[in-house]
Image: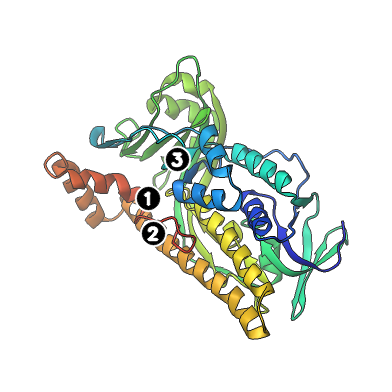
Amino acid sequence: MDNRNQPVLVVGAGPVGMVAALALRSLGLPATVIEAELEGRFREGSRAIYIHKATLTLLEEVSPGLGHTLAKNGVIWPVKRTLYRGKEVYVRKYQPPTPGELPAFTSLAQVEIEKHLYQACKDAGVRFVWGAPIASVRSGADGVALTAQSGETWNAEYVIAADGARSAVRREVGIEMEGPRSQDYFLVVDVKEDEADPMPLERTFHYSHPEMDGRNVLLVPFKGGWRVDLQLLEGDDAEAFGGVDGVRKWLPKVMDPKYADRVTWVSTYQFYQVVAKSFADAKRRVLLAGEAAHLFAPFGARGLNSGVPDAILAARGIRRALDAADEGAREEAIAAAAEERRTAALHNRDAAGIALEHIQGSSPYMNMKRELAASLCSVVPKLGRWLDEGPYGPKQGSSKVSTKY
């Protein structure tokens, strides 16, 4: 590969990095993705499993057919339920998707999402450099120099940094993250579906599950399995609940006991609400996207669904910058893309905070509101809907690339 000056380099071959590469190709630009890990790396767990229609629509724009491919290979659960201390307070049944149209969402494991993105990248002529962790980044008036730990160097006019939560590029250009991190812990458990005798295809959220001593439980189906989220209470031992014996003890209380023998992945996380202070470096040569730019908790599916428009808007901003008539217009194109996505990220951070307050149950005022809503939802149905939507924060808007995913 020619390491001399290129228009754009993408760092990170996760889903956001691959979307950035596809967006660049759709704009007529060459795309090279540099990845720290080796090709064919193993990535545990379901991770991002839920893709909104708005995201599917954006993927169709940069790679025609990709949104439909993901929809076809995922599952679209027809029912969602919310229960409060065992009592059903909300249920919604969805109509089957219209043939030929994108559905409201699709649900499949991130490893499967990445397989389809990778194939789309190969079909689009994207180049990949594997096993090249970035050691240093020099951003200047004329472009960016990336140097790997091996000493190999690449030069580009622009870089899209999609290299994850521990982004080496973000660190090297001196951009800090800011925002709170909850002290509460949550567990994510993946279980493999019993295809011969599957559970009903329903997303179910339990406030204060009666078998779990007041802990909240979320069950979400995805292609081939289930995601189970368990909220731990203050004083809970996360390692005890998340250990093999711990999961085997509590999982049969929230789903068919047979699934205790079908666990494939367990992860513990805290509720992050952090956003980069800037989505572009001082020289307006590096743009951040995805978890390099923000970290949100899984509730609300804000990670991948905000990373995709980050990547696409970064590519479009770079295209405008490359076409700019002067330096002022060039810088403005990058700054505008960065600020638009940072505004969206701040919206998501605030929404995540509202969702956390709603599900924690630590506020007497919020507890009173939840109790009242649960007791009156049969008379005032919109109160049940409020309980259902609460764990996800405010609604997220339309499918335009500039909206707050």
Asked whether, in this view, residue 123 is left or right of residue 315, the answer is right
Q: Is residue 126 shown above or below 286?
A: above
Quadrant position of residue 169:
bottom right
Q: Is residue 85 shown above or below 28?
A: above
Asked whether, in this view, residue 147 is left or right of residue 386, the answer is right
**235, 189: nearer the viewer:** 189
Please state which amino acid type lies under the numbered disc 2: Ala
* Label 1, label 3: how far apart the Cα atoms are: 25 Å
Please state which amino acid type lies under the numbered disc 1: Tyr
Q: Are marks 1 and 2 in contact (CB under 8 Å)?
A: yes
Please state which amino acid type lies under the numbered disc 3: Glu
* Label 1, label 2: how far apart the Cα atoms are: 8 Å
Query: Of label 1 and label 3, which has the lower sequence position?
Result: 3
Name the residue located 51 percent from the left edge and 37 percent from the top edge. Answer: 71
Crowd class of label 2 (few under 14; some 14 to 19; many from 20; radius 10 Å):
many
Crowd class of label 1 (few under 14; some 14 to 19; many from 20; radius 10 Å):
many
Could you say where residue 147 lies in the image, as x and y percent from the top left?
82, 64
Q: Is residue 255 shown above or below 187?
A: above
Asked whether, in this view, residue 186 is left or right of residue 366, the answer is right
* Residue 115 makes an appearance in the image: yes
Crowd class of label 3 (few under 14; some 14 to 19; many from 20; radius 10 Å):
few
Q: Which residue is mark 3?
A: 101
Name the residue located 51 percent from the left edge and 41 percent from the top edge. Answer: 49
**145, 76: nearer the viewer:** 76
Mark 3, secondary structure of its residue = loop
Query: Of label 1 and label 2, which has the lower sequence position?
Result: 2
Of the 4 image quadrants, the one containing the N terminus is bottom right
Q: Which residue is mark 2?
A: 351
Q: Which residue is mark 1?
A: 392
Name the residue located 32 percent from the left edge and 52 percent from the top edge. Answer: 358
